Every structure is written in structure tokens, then in C-alpha cells.
Image (spheres, rainbow, N blue to C red):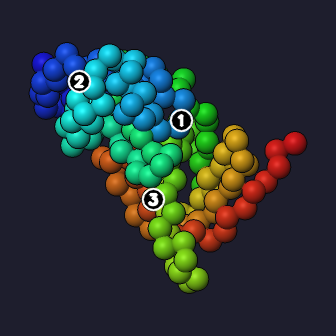
Amino acid sequence: MITVDSSTIELSTTQHDVLSTLTSLFDGAPVKSRTLADVLDRSPGTVRMQMGTLRSLGFVKGIPGPRGGYKPTPKTFELLDLDYSDTVADVPLYREGERVEGITVTEFDLINIHHPDRREAEVGFHGLLGDLACGDTITIGPTPASGLVVDGVVDGIDRSEELLYIRVEDIDVRDEA
């Protein structure tokens, strides 16, 4: 039995092994169930079944599509007593031009990208937001691989799910050189 967020969750040995393997293979890109199955010497069906349960418990996020797979959530790293920041590149968040220390952006999903007047994004983060509030102007990035930088305004905050909802004002690629 494992205590997470002041509640007791009972994970099977297989589920624990799946999470341990997922975090060891995770390099920022989704890990395919076939890859997990090969490493664990289990069937892909068994892995997918376990992932459904682990996703409902908030330990993994399923990424659809041909490049999809599974990503561990910060909750998984906490459960396994691992440092999340060792597994992902640092993507900074700035408020009003000042870096918000202790925050790393973990994912960025554009919503309504085709809507000309209302581009929105859902931003996953890890860390403590401090006094960040709705209405604050923020900048996310640059991302390490592409130099992507997003400017926007915070429309909503879900601290328990570690999500920011922002109105995207500008998307740019900046050369760090």
C-alpha cells in the first residue's frame, strides 16, 4: 500500500514495475506500450490495461497518435521518490519579465489554435506557483530543442492538477545563440 495525497492507493507489483520502467525510459517523449512491454517481458495488452488504471489514478498521461505513448506525471516521480527535474529539460516560466523560480513547464497543449481571436493553451507545470494569479502576463520558454517561446495571459489555474490555462498572445521561435 502506498499513501499519495493523504489517501491510500494500493498498487500491484506489476503497476509499480510499469511506473519504474516508464520513468527510466522517459526522456521527454512519450514511451510506447510496445517498448514498455518488451522491457518488462509482458504482453502489450497487459501494459495497456495497467496504463488505463494508472492513468485513472493520475500517474500517467496517455498521448494519442502515431507518435504517442505514455508519459509519467510528476505524481509518479513523487511516488518513486525521484527528482522530476533530472528527467526533463528545464523550460522556464516568467511573470511580467521575471523568472518564477522553482517552476518548470512540463507540457504545453494548444487549444483553439485555428480561432483567430482566441488562441488558448493548457500548460502543465511542476513546482509551486507562489502568488501567480489570473490576469498575470507570462512568458514560457524558450524550449531547449526548438527555442519556442509563448507569451500570454493567465486565464485559470488548477493547482491540484498542476495546470495553467492561458490566452496566447504570441508564439515565436527565438535563437538562443
- Where residue 27 sits, quadrant-wise, is top right
- Quick one: label 2 or label 1, which is nearer the N terminus? 2
**Which residue is at 75% across, 57% downward?**
173
Amino acid type assigned to the residue bearing label 2 in the image:
Gln
Q: Which residue is mark 1?
A: 28
**Horizontal relation, residue 153 to residue 46: left or right:** right
Instruction: Determine contact: label 2, label 1, CB under 8 Å.
Output: no
Total tally of numbered discs in the picture: 3
**Which residue is at 48% across, 28% downward?**
26
Amino acid type assigned to the residue bearing label 3 in the image:
Glu
**Which residue is at 68% across, 55% downward?**
149
Residue 138, image x, y percentages: 59, 59
Q: Nearer the viewer, mark 2 or mark 3?
A: 2
Q: Residue 15 bears which disc, if any?
A: 2
Amino acid type assigned to the residue bearing label 1 in the image:
Gly
Relative to 117, is 63 above or below? above
**Which residue is at 13% across, 19% downward?**
1
Residue 151, image x, y percentages: 64, 63
Q: Residues within 10 Å of mark 2 (few under 14, many from 20)?
A: some
Q: Which residue is mark 3?
A: 122
**Horizontal relation, residue 37 to residue 145: left or right:** left
State the CA–CA distance, disc 2 to disc 1. Answer: 21 Å
**Horizontal relation, residue 111 to residue 79: left or right:** right
Q: Nearer the viewer, residue 40 or 87?
A: 40
- Quick one: label 3 or label 1, which is nearer the N terminus? 1
Q: In the displayed orientation, state which residue is furthest to the bottom.
A: 117
